[in-house]
Amino acid sequence: MRTLSPLRAFLGRWGLTNSQLDPLIGRIVRTVRENIRRDMLDAGLNPDFELRILNSRDDPDRWGDPNVSRVIVGGTIDQSGIPTIGIAQSIDPGNFGTEESALVLLDILSDPPAGFGDPSLNSYIGPGSYRLGFIGRAVGNIVSHEAGHFFGNWPSDPGYGQTPS
């Protein structure tokens, strides 16, 4: 059992306030819904496939119920013991394991800027940037990428600079 810092613990590192937590969660969830829906439409919408995207702000915790997978957003490398930004329990072509977990860690994503190519989102935010929108989209894309793995998608670029699954 590990204890991970929640998303709200990283807001200040991105220059966001506690009052922006709910809108940020909303943007992350909208991005995930958009990404997953677009993938399903592109693939032809399998009529035997049902997907509901829930979040811990608006919905009870369903983890442990049959056919519930989750993506945990929060925590650091030190807290998790996993040296990455995001990781899924498996890459599951066929989605046979329907109760899996993925993790999106936020320490590197919220580190101080270190220049172009740095994975910190702060490297891409300037004084006139719409921080809330950018961070919501970026974190939502990473959540979608990791969920894509346990839905059965292999990385489309097996190198370091992976593109979304």
Image (tube, rainbow, N blue to C red):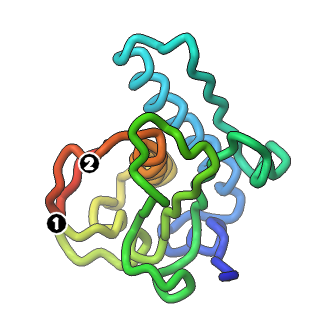
Foreground tag (2 vs 1)? 2
Q: Is residue 83 above or below residue 158?
A: below
The quarter of the rendered structure image containing the C terminus is top left
Residue at 37 percent of width and 73 percent of height: 84
The residue under label 1 is 116
The residue under label 2 is 155
Q: Label 2 is placed on what type of residue?
A: Pro
Q: Label 1 is placed on what type of residue?
A: Phe
Q: Observer-nearest residue: 30 or 3?
A: 3
- In the rendered image, residue 37, in percent from the top left (x then y), is placed at 48, 23
- In the rendered image, residue 136, in percent from the top left (x then y), is placed at 50, 48
Q: Earlier in the sequence, mark 2 or mark 1?
A: 1
Would residue 149 appear left or right of 96 to someone viewing this image? left
Q: Is residue 49 at least partly visible in the picture?
A: yes
- Say which element carries label 1: loop
Residue at 48 percent of width and 50 percent of height: 143
Q: Is residue 103 above or below residue 69?
A: below
Q: Residues within 10 Å of mark 2 (few under 14, many from 20)?
A: some
Q: Observer-nearest residue: 88 or 96?
A: 96
Distance from disc 2 to disc 1, alpha carbons, whole Å, reads 23 Å
Residue 130: mark: none
The quarter of the rendered structure image containing the N terminus is bottom right
Residue at 19 percent of width and 72 percent of height: 115
Would residue 95 appear left or right of 156 to someone viewing this image? right
